[in-house]
Amino acid sequence: MLRRDMNRRTMRRTDPSQYKHVVLGMLKWLRENNWRSYDPYDAGLSPIARLISKRGWWVLQHVVRLSPVNVRPLLCVKKQVHPKGLAHAMQMCIVLGDIEQNDDMLHTARSLADMLVELATRDKDKYAWNYPFPYITRVLSVRGSTNIVNTSFVALAFLDAYKAFGKAAYLEAAVGAAEYIIRNIGYETHSSGRICFYYAPKAPHTLTIHNANMVAASLLHRLGEMQNNEEYRGLSGSAAQYSVDHQRDDGLWHYSERAGWRSIDCLHSGFILDALMSMGGTRRASPYHRPLEKGMTGFRGFLNGDGKVSHVLNRAYPKDTRSYAQFIRTASRWSAHEPEWLGLACIAADKVIETMFSRRGYCYYRRYRGMTIKTPFIRWSIGPMLLALSDLVERLSIPRRQNILAMQVA
């Protein structure tokens, strides 16, 4: 059944209009909400979180996150502007603005990029971005500190903005983020000469996470190639090789090598695979080509026979919109090298639109067995879905754009 569905979607893949319609609906919702939303982990904004123990805060955070009813207004938690979500929205506007030659979309992209510059935490020539809420994990609690994931993703978006618009401030922000990651966040050095970037400044030395490490490595790689910077190239290669060395036999990665953190999920596996693609892994001569091919074989296992995407490997639930988005994005990008993946991306896109979207235009957070958490989150679900569907639209638009170009030349 899945193969038949894939063939049907591949035959009609030159019509991306339904996905554009969904993207424009999400963009409309974001504008109506002034680019603000709640977040799964924002319970720390409640005054109650400051009055209870760290254990109590941890429990409150997860009760709020997993509640099918949005209780944040009762806890005095307000919607916030989320830099990572804005960055993805900006990237989407660049992609669709270029495809459609839409000046309004490109103007929105520039406005969001300028907003992100203003949202940066600045330390002289260094730039960083954080979540606009305090949060707590099993190993650290964070109030007002920056982290490598937000900073890397926003900086990568700035490189896209610099390529599109040529504004020096965007490149300055990306370089400043790289300097912040190297000098302020730092990395763990192993006896093999490999390194693994930490998650946050002053984080415990054991808090090294493969997907965060690889996203930072991809940023340093892009900047190293753009600026012929050997330091960035060296650190990027050493960090990437650390994670490649820890690739499992099935092609995937544990979240971390730390005991108790060895889960495997679609979202973070996709981060690593996207990073390997951006670091040249699609080229057969690249040292990352075989790990990337092996990883994509394992990544295929997250798409089930019914077209649904598993969030955690070999588990039916939860169904997480962000994992759908990541599968769509990674499959769309890889389809440039293995075209059948474009059909798989369409299958996942059709299923998430069918099962995880509101008629108001936004996508839900998660579906569990027996309940759905429908609260819209720009950082977690809407932003990544915008980016994923714009990548899919871009891939689907290539035959049509080539035909138009051929007609113009003729």
Image (tube, rainbow, N blue to C red):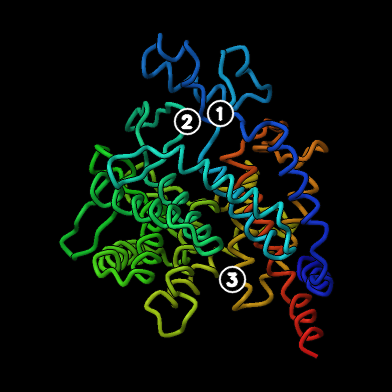
Quadrant of res 321: top right
Residue toward you, 401 or 370: 401
Instruction: Give the x, y percent position of residue 401.
Output: 75, 75
Which amino acid is tagged 1? Gln
Instruction: Give the x, y percent position of residue 164.
Output: 56, 63
Residue plotted at (35% across, 27% down): 141
Residue toward you, 111 or 364: 111
Q: Quadrant of the C terminus?
A: bottom right
Where residue 195 is drawn, which disc sits there? none
Q: Circle 3 is placed at which residue position?
A: 334
Mark 1 or mark 2: whose residue is earlier in sequence = 1
Instruction: Give the x, y percent position of residue 22.
Output: 78, 50
Measured in 3D between alpha carbons, the distance from the residue under mark 1 to the one under mark 2, in whole angstroms, is 7 Å
Q: Secondary structure at mark 2?
A: loop
Which amino acid is tagged 3? Trp
Q: Residues at badges 1 and 2 in contact (C-beta under 8 Å)? A: yes
Residue toward you, 50 or 83: 83
Q: Secondary structure at mark 3?
A: helix
Q: Circle 2 is placed at which residue position?
A: 132
Q: Kindly tell me whether residue 317 is visible in this rendering.
A: no
Q: Circle 1 is placed at which residue position?
A: 80
Q: Residues at badges 2 and 3 in contact (C-beta under 8 Å)? A: no
Mark 3 or mark 1: whose residue is earlier in sequence = 1
Residue toward you, 228 or 25: 228
